Image: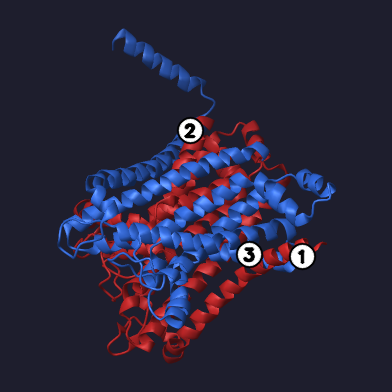
Amino acid sequence: MTELELTTWRRVKTAALLAPSPSFDRRRVSNALASGFMLVSAAIAVSVLTLIVGNVVMSGWPALNLAFFTERPLPPGEVGGGVAPAIVGTLLMVAVGSCIGVPVGVFTAVYLSEYGRGGLAHTVSFVIDLIAGLPSIAVGVFVWAFLVRNVVGQYNGLAGGVALAIVMIPIITRTVEETLRLVPDSLREASLALGIPTWRTILRVVLPTAKAGLVTGVVLSLTRAGGETAPLLLTALGNQFFNLDPRQPMAALSVQIYQYARSPYPDWHAKAWAAALVLITLGAALSAVTRWAIQGRRKFG
Amino acid sequence: MGRGDRVFAGVATALAAAVPLLLVAIVLLLMADALPAVQRYGLGFLTNSMWDPVAEKFGAAAYAYGTVVTSALALLIAGPIGVGCALFIAEYAPASVRGLVAFLVDLLATIPSVIYGLWGFFVLAPVMRSGLEPFLKNTFGPLPVVGALFTGPAVGRDLLVAGVILAIMILPTVTAVSREVLRAVPDTQREGMLALGATKWETISKAVLPYARGGIAGALILGLARALGETMAVTMVIGNSSTRIQASLFTPGYTLASAIANQFTEADKAIYFSAIITIALVLLLVACALNILARLLVWSVSRGPGAGSVRA
């Protein structure tokens, strides 16, 4: 043994003698193992995210060009074209979804936070959670049975928008309600004391104060709706052509990804990745806004 | 109350009341459409695995089996990792890392299902086929009992791959809800344990986790509910070919949700439609039941004893 090894050995020996009990070592080891497991869990979650986003960026980027955003899909097997109808369709259907989902979601939140007492409020609050947990494909089946079969008679963009609205409502309600409850009562009281009616107090004092939460809720729901696929597959179906008529089948980016991924053509696979990149980028941009809004909310939280 | 007040309150109440009505409408409409199949096949719909549209024989047992197996796999993988991740964020991570990790895990939840499917189809499936599945087959295949799970050709589009994709998808749900539950555990629980000289892990395993047990069970059930109803990603990686019930995880199968997505536009007969809508109804009712159970469990922790001294 060298001098250094000898010293080390002596130190280890001393440490062992000084340790309170052998069980303390076991406790330290299990503590280290547990910390290690938690660190690894977090590392797995983060690296899976990195891997997926990395793959989407790497595979999607090369297929992005002007034609991708401006042209319609070419017939199967032909290389080129783009997914413009799907981009337009997604925007249109999300817009329809917002026109229904935002008012219903926000007013439900206002009801729950400002008016809701007793049975109806409890029921609404409970049902909102249930709707949030519905499998989105079941929502699609419902909207198909109601709007596609009974009202319009064929797959159509309007039904797609309605299905998205049902997905959006619970997200908006939950986020907005939470924020409205954070608005201090003193603000409401001050406004009411000035003789301003309740409804103007809500519109001009409470909602503007909760603006950040309102933005958060709406943006979150838009992100969710933009990526929804299953309900659109059963309602809007998809379309290779430009279509602005809500009574006709309509394309959507998410549905296009699904159809392209299942095809045997490499060019369509590349386009599926590119469409995924566009969707994720939109979602990330919106999430950044959300984050910013949440931080704004803390000011009065 | 002035007229403006009455109108405004009326609009808010009406729109809020529309929400429960919507759920009732969904359930009633699906029930009405499911009725023919339910009357014709009864409970056999869920116990029979024969699904033959031509002969008009419909039994969804194989689909239900696929749903149960893939969801159980997902929970088995995402449960420990998700809770570990939540513990890391809530108990271990320094403040500077905490927010970032929480944000990144939440980001995982914003990736659309179809993109998970795309990634699973082109990236995960080939890796599973050539890497993990042959390894599992060689390692566990010869063993008794367990071996049955890893037999047959590794195809990369099967129950196992669907389970792994689902695990990734429910990870953020499990993590986020567990994190909230852990935040609701009063600090006095931790301080008491630490004051006795307990290590960090002893504090967590003996004082924090027992307190949060119900809520974490709730988080797992919410994850399970999400896995059961998940459609697109599963449809893209599960193979959609066999309707036989086989023990092997390498079986290309179906789940209830993927059967709807795959066959909905193909259904050409009234009874075929009715059978598919019955599947949707079953999914909906199971999801509702699981959600109710999970909410009750999570509430029981956040309203538990000592909830008055919650940190947040």
In the picture shown, does residue A203 fall above or below A50?
A: below
Discs 1/2, front:
1
- Distance of label 2 from label 3 (alpha carbons): 35 Å
Q: Quadrant of residue B261?
A: bottom left
- N-terminal of the pair, mark 1 or mark 2, is 1
Residue found at the very far top of the displayed protein? A3
Disc 3 designates what residue? A126
Q: Residue at x 24, y 54 (%)?
A: A271
- Distance of label 1 from label 2 (alpha carbons): 49 Å
- For disc 1, the chain is B
Q: Position of residue A76 (x, y in %)?
A: 18, 65
Along the line of sight, which residue is nearer the eye, B208 or B24?
Answer: B24
**Dot 1 surroundings within 10 Å: few (below 14), some, or many (20 or more)?**
few
Disc 2 designates what residue? B97
Q: Residue at x 51, y 66 (%)?
A: A166
- For disc 2, the chain is B
Q: Position of residue B129 (x, y in %)?
A: 21, 56
Q: Position of residue B283 (x, y in %)?
A: 46, 72
Discs 3/1, front:
1
Badges 2 and 3, same chain: no
Residue B7 is left or right of residue B47, and the answer is: right
The red-tinted chain is: B
Q: Amino acid at mark 1?
A: Arg
Residue B39 is left or right of residue B151, and the answer is: right
- For disc 3, the chain is A
Q: Quadrant of residue A212?
A: top right
Disc 1 designates what residue? B6
Q: Position of residue A235 (x, y in %)?
A: 40, 72
Badges 3 and 1, same chain: no
